[in-house]
Image: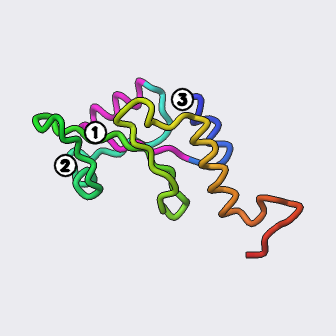
Amino acid sequence: MEFQKELAVAYTQLVVLSTDPPEVSAAFRAGLGAQFPFLCDQERKVQRLLDLQETTDPRHNPIIPYSFTLYPDLTIYRIYNGYWFWGRPTREELRMDFRAISRQIRPDWDLQHPRTS
């Protein structure tokens, strides 16, 4: 939750996509004290669209825990497969992704050598 404060300074936001019902997601969000949105995919439309079905438990139909870093236009910059703990992004990896994205999209990133376009 501390990371959300850092991201707010850079006008960057986290979003969570859950397959839980809205009331469960809302309770989890409140319990965490999260300020970022929790989107609900209870019908698992996004899960099917992005082929995120975890196949080892067909009874519960869990979603593979991916993390995406995105450009402002929602183009994917990097994908992290969090099925295993070591596949999940660290705060530092997310910082580096956001730094790289900002460097690419901000013409004023380097004030000594600003880009004109």
**Residue sitting nearer the eye, 63 or 43:** 63
* Residue wearing tag 3: 1
Q: Position of residue 30 (x, y in %)?
A: 41, 28
Q: Is residue 91 above or below residue 108?
A: above
- Spatial CA distance of label 3 from label 1 is 20 Å
**Circles 2, 3 touching at the beta carbon (< 8 Å):** no
Q: Which residue lies furthest to the right in this view?
A: 112
- Spatial CA distance of label 2 from label 3 is 28 Å
Please tell me which residue is depicted at 45% across the width and 49% down the height of the picture.
79
* Residue wearing tag 1: 22
Q: Any magenta on residue 19?
A: yes
Q: Is residue 48 above or below residue 4?
A: below
Where, by quadrant of the figure, is residue 92 drawn? top right
- Going by the numbered disc 1, the residue's amino acid type is Pro
- Going by the numbered disc 2, the residue's amino acid type is Glu
Please tell me which residue is depicted at 68% across the width and 43% down the height of the picture.
9
* Residue wearing tag 2: 43
74 sits left or right of 19 in the view: right
Q: Quadrant of the N terminus?
A: top right
SS assignment at label 2: loop
Please tell me which residue is depicted at 78% across the width and 70% down the height of the picture.
115
- Going by the numbered disc 3, the residue's amino acid type is Met
Please tell me which residue is depicted at 22% across the width and 38% down the height of the picture.
62
Q: Where is residue 38 in the image (x, y as percent from the top left)?
A: 39, 41
Magenta residues, start to end: 13-31
